[in-house]
Structure formats: C-alpha cells, structure tokens
Image (cartoon, rainbow, N blue to C red):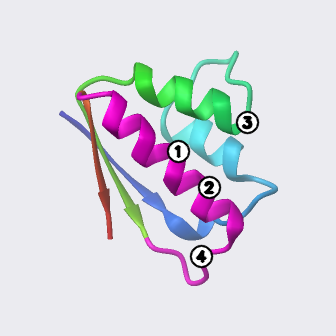
Amino acid sequence: MKQIVLDGNKLADAANVHEYLKEMLSFPEYYGKNLDALHDCLTELDDIEITIEAPLEDGAIYQKIIRIFKAAAKANKGLNLIIV
C-alpha cells in the first residue's frame, strides 16, 4: 500500500492547494484543479493511504478539501484516509 502524508498547512493555501495535491498525489496532467476534479481523481486512486496533518489554522478551503477527501474515501474502498 502506498502511503502519503499531506501537510494541512498547504491544504489551507487556496492559491496553491491544487498544485500541491497534483504533485503529491501524482494526478494526471488533465487534472482540472477544482473540487470536482479532486473528487474524481481521489476516487480513481487504489491501494493508497493518505494521512492529512492538521494545519495551524483550518480555514474555509481546508474544510472544503477535507469534505472532498472524506466523500472520496467513502466512495473508494481503495483509499484509506487518516486525519491527525
């Protein structure tokens, strides 16, 4: 199982969050860099564990990203999500 740790501080940075996720999760070039595309790409992952470390401040974009991750993990049994 592939394991990835995401820095919650970078998930709270609205300007760069999608670039960070694309790089860290090896999303394809066609990744649309929006929340719908994030959900789609997360549901396509398989045999992966993603740990999200809490940010110093969990603003609106972080909360939206977490909701997308949780929904994708519910829909995709190959994605194990841990939030610490």
Q: Which mark is residue 64?
A: 2
Between residue 6 and residue 73, name the one nearer to us.
Answer: 73
Image quadrant occupied by the C terminus: bottom left
Do the numbered discs 1 and 4 sit on residues whose CB atoms are within 8 Å?
A: no
Residue at image mark 3: 34
Q: Residues within 10 Å of mark 2 (few under 14, many from 20)?
A: few
Dot in front, 1 or 3: 1
Distance from the alpha carbon under mark 4 to that under mark 2: 10 Å
Residue placed under numbered mark 1 in the picture? 68
Toward which corner of the image does residue 38 lie, by quadrant?
top right
Q: What residue is at 65 percent from the left and 66 percent from the top?
A: 12
Numbered mark located on residue 58 in the image: 4
| C-alpha span from label 3 to label 4 | 19 Å
- In the rendered image, the vertical position of residue 73 relative to residue 6, given as above or below: above
Taking depth in this image into account, of 72 and 10 the one nearest to the observer is 72
Calculate the distance from the C-alpha at mark 3 to the C-alpha at mark 2: 11 Å
The residue carrying pointer 4 sits among few (fewer than 14), some (14 to 19) or many (20 or more) residues within 10 Å by Cα, namely some
Establish if 13 lies above or below 37: below
Q: Say which label, 3 or 4, has the lower sequence index.
A: 3
The amino acid on which the numbered mark 1 sits, given as a three-letter code, is Ile
Say which element carries label 3: loop
Q: Which residues are magenta?
A: 54-77
The image position of residue 4, as x and y in percent, is 35, 47
- Judged from the image, the secondary structure of the residue bearing numbered disc 4 is loop
Callout 1: few (<14), some (14-19), or many (20+) C-alpha neighbours within 10 Å? some
Q: Earlier in the sequence, mark 4 or mark 2?
A: 4
User: Which amino acid lies under the numbered mark 4 shown in the image of this protein?
Assistant: Asp
Whether the magenta-drawn stretch holds residue 2 is answered as no
Q: Residue at x 23, y 27 (%)?
A: 47
**Among the two numbered marks 3 and 2 on one chain, the one whose residue lies closer to the N terminus:** 3
From the viewer's perspective, is residue 28 above or below residue 73? above
